[in-house]
């Protein structure tokens, strides 16, 4: 779970930069990143979980429950179970950027 959080935190930071808001200060990271990561988790769940078959759902639960799961393990999992994972993530990032610009 921590590896997935790290991956999502890095993604949230990149989305912020791509949205033209620049790098976050440490104080801004403390304030905004938990919310952005939470929104990303929710969005990923809504978009990708329905695409998993039963074995994918079981594997997801196992990875999520294992403290030793690495970011690479998550990447491999999503790439295996959602063939267009990278494209979907880019689309989600694009939506976040549009949304970020609209509220900035």
Image: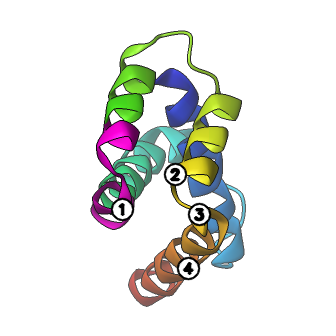
Marks 4/2: CA–CA distance: 18 Å
Residue 55, x across and y down, in percent? 36, 38
Q: 68 above or below 6?
A: above
Q: Is residue 79 above or below residue 76?
A: below
Quadrant of the drawing holding the N terminus: top left
State how far apart marks 1 and 3 are (Cα).
11 Å
- Point out the tag, 4 or 2, that comes first from the N-terminus: 2
In the rendered view, tell whether residue 67 sits above or below residue 102. Answer: above
- Residue 46 percent across, percent down from the top left: 28, 63
Find disc 3 in the rendering and name its residue: 85
Are circles 2 and 3 on residues that touch, CB within 8 Å? yes
Q: Nearer the viewer, residue 29 or 38?
A: 38
Figure check: 73 above or below 36: above
Any magenta on residue 54?
yes
**Would you say 59 lies left or right of 45 here?**
right
Badge 1 marks a residue whose secondary structure is helix
> How far separated are the C-alphas under marks 4 and 3?
10 Å
Residue 28 lies in the magenta stretch: no
> Could you tell me which residue is drawn at 39 percent across and 58 percent down?
44
State the residue position of label 4.
Answer: 91
Q: Magenta-highlighted stretch: main secondary structure?
A: helix
Of helix, strand and loop, which one carries label 2? helix
Where disc 4 sits, the SS reads: helix
The disc, 2 or 1, on the residue closer to the chain's N-terminal end is 1
């Amino acid at each position: 779970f921590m590896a997935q959080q790290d991956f999502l935190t890095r993604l949230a930071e990149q989305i912020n930069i791509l949205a033209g808001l620049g790098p976050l200060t440490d104080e801004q990271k403390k304030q905004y990143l938990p919310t952005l990561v939470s929104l990303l988790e929710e969005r990923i769940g809504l978009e990708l979980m329905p695409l998993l078959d039963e074995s994918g759902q079981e594997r997801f639960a196992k990875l999520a429950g294992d403290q030793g799961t690495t970011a690479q393990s998550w990447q491999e999992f999503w790439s295996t179970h959602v063939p267009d994972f990278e494209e979907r993530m880019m689309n989600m990032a694009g939506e976040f950027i549009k949304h970020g610009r609209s509220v900035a």
